[in-house]
Amino acid sequence: MSEINPLLQKFDHPPFSKIKTEHFKPAFEKSLKEARNEIDAIINNSEEPSFKNTIETLEFSGDQLGRVASIFFNLNSAETNPEIQKLAQEISPLLSEFNNDLLLNKGLFDKIKQVYEDKSNHDFTEEQIMLLDKIYKNFTRNGANLDEKKQERLREIDKLLSLTSLKFGENVLAETNNFQLHISDEIELDGIPDSVKESARDTAKDKGKDGYILTLDYPTYIPVMKFAKNRKLRNQMFLGFGSKAFKDNEFNNEENVLEIVRLRLERANLLGFNSHADFVLQERMAKRIDNVESFLDDILEKALPAAEKEMEELKAFAQESDGIKDLQKWDKAFYTEKLKQKKFDLDEEDLKPYFELNQVIKGMFEITSKLFNLRFEKVETLEVYHKDVVTYKVYESDKYLATLYADFHPRPGKRDGAWMTTYKDQSNYEGVEERPQVSIVCNFTKPTKEKPSLLTFNEVTTLFHEFGHALHAMNANTTYPSLSGASVYWDFVELPSQLMENWCYEKEALELFAKHYETNEVLPIEYIEKIKASSNFMEGLQTTRQVSFGKLDMAWHALTGTEGIDNVKAHEDKAFKSTELLPEVYNNCMSTAFGHIFQGGYSSGYYSYKWAEVLDADAFEFFKEEGIFNEAVAKKYKENILQKGGTVEPTKLYKEFRGKEPGPKALLKRAGLVSS
């Protein structure tokens, strides 16, 4: 008797303990077959095409396929292994083929088009119109109107893009895991926090070595760059981090970058767009390349003079402190931290005991309870994919709202960074309410034998950021899953996440969670004042850095031709030229590991982090005017932003919440780049 495949049984929460890697391929094959049958049923329906039998039926088709894919690709990011990576290379082309078969299906598109062109004769709700427009555009933007020959080439491009992006990500992960700097003598680690040294010692022990092993995981890399007095060590770590997938080995991503850029441009051209950015921005708040470029240039115009002044101050400080006459990129974080300590008498290590992970989580939940009347109940009955994962049931008053999975610490099978994802989206169709299952994944400092997980302040804001995304998904209250939660324009999606970070700087909020892990003493008021005072420290450099990433993204994706673009590093250097304030490092390259734009969904969209900062600064100003826990403002925000998802055009949603259009003044003021 063959083994029962848990992925092909009915399940609500993912049955992680029962899932084996070999279950995925047959589950995908059967789910794909069922999804194709559901599409055929729409096409073969002899009734006149209607919103219900065409648009809504299509919206709810492929449910099982979506659930299987969400589990598989989340595991490939958070708990991967060579077998899963190999399988991803097999599965991705199958999904690309299915997606193309769907979007290039003439019989299906003809029915959708008929409903779309007849919409003025029906009294559709605003959400129904958004769904109809989204589905129609999804087809036309993916080749439904192309001739057969061009459609065939589109299929080839999508399959190649899928595989190349996967390979790009695998190479970056392999390079991250392969880097190990073995240190025998503790004196070389002078200045590095004890918790990082303990973790490095544990890593060495796990690998059967004496001494310490430093890795490129963020909780190790960032503190080393900020605190290591050993300049040579900082240099080694910086070069290791900055040369990921740029070395002359099997994991080099240069050709993958060029191939992704060429394929995206060809795809955009096939669909009638001048560039990939033109294609992407049609479905963004920014709308056009020149709007993005002028937005980045306007921000840079305000930030660059401040950045240049800050850099001169940093160089002078490095020379005065240690006789450094040639400040390099691997020195920047170290002297920035040292100058910050001098100016504000604020040592990041002094703050960490007040930010024990579980205490921060508890406080974050309390803040959310005050704002949105939510309650988080830890549960241990749900299955998880790794023992580190913690699960919560979320309630609004006494009504079940969502499930939250939280995965906080780095490990070899987990990619760098932090992200929010879902295992199940919210919907409420014809009286059947499905509540979301949401996951936040981070890479925070691990607990050691001596200490719990103590967060840096930056890790605290990262946690609040990802939790802001989770709130968007958990509070969703829409009819259709594809319009639910964070399914919004990409340059609007960062508003909920970046807005949540603001509470980390407020005394009233900090006092709820910033408590010493040994004494339970609340973070002293002088520290809170220093956090506030230092929040704008080196803001010119930070803003310039963010703008430079947006410019690099546009440099790759606003291209209207790739002739002569054959050197990744040279093209990158050109993009960075207007923002570069320190000597370039010839054997480092950001593009080859820039997962946001070459593996994630941020191609032509990295500017949206800064765009969303304009929104979040303006939105939080509203909270500050009325009180950071003001129930009326929180209610307006919840009802107009968190619950509505992509059911209404974002500019309209924002104006409903704020009462006016957003402007950059609040952001520039908050950043200290303008006085008032």
Image (tube, helix red, strand yellow):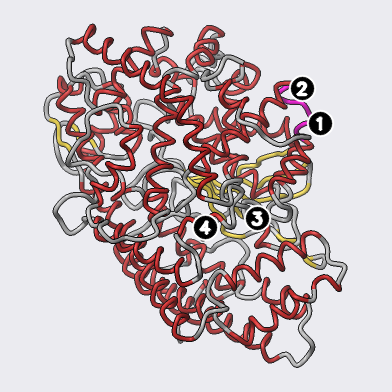
* Residue under the point 56% across and 67% down: 67
Task: Confirm or deny contact between disc 1 and disc 3 (CB under 8 A).
Answer: no
Sort mark 4 into few (<14), some (14-19) or many (20+) by Cα contacts within 10 Å: many
Residue at mark 1 to residue at mark 2: CA–CA distance: 9 Å
Q: Secondary structure at mark 4?
A: helix
- Residue on which the image places disc 2: 626
Q: Is residue 81 magenta?
A: no
| Side of 280 relative to 577 (left or right) | right
Question: Residue 436 — which label?
Answer: 3
Q: Nearer the viewer, residue 451 or 535?
A: 535
| Side of 428 relative to 343 (left or right) | right
Task: Confirm or deny contact between disc 4 and disc 2 (CB under 8 A).
Answer: no
Task: Confirm or deny contact between disc 1 and disc 2 (CB under 8 A).
Answer: yes
Q: Earlier in the sequence, mark 4 or mark 2?
A: 4
Question: Residue 280 — which label?
Answer: 4
Q: Secondary structure at mark 3?
A: loop
Q: Secondary structure at mark 2?
A: helix
Q: Which residues are magenta?
A: 627-634
Q: Earlier in the sequence, mark 1 or mark 3?
A: 3
At label 3, the amino acid type is Pro
* Residue under the point 25% across and 44% down: 589
- Residue on which the image places disc 1: 632
Task: Confirm or deny contact between disc 3 and disc 2 (CB under 8 A).
Answer: no
Q: Is residue 557 above or below residue 192?
A: below
Residue at mark 3 to residue at mark 2: CA–CA distance: 31 Å
Sort mark 3 into few (<14), some (14-19) or many (20+) by Cα contacts within 10 Å: many
- Work out which quarter of the rendered image holds the C terminus and state it: top right
Residue 532 in the image: x percent, y percent? 54, 15
At label 2, the amino acid type is Glu
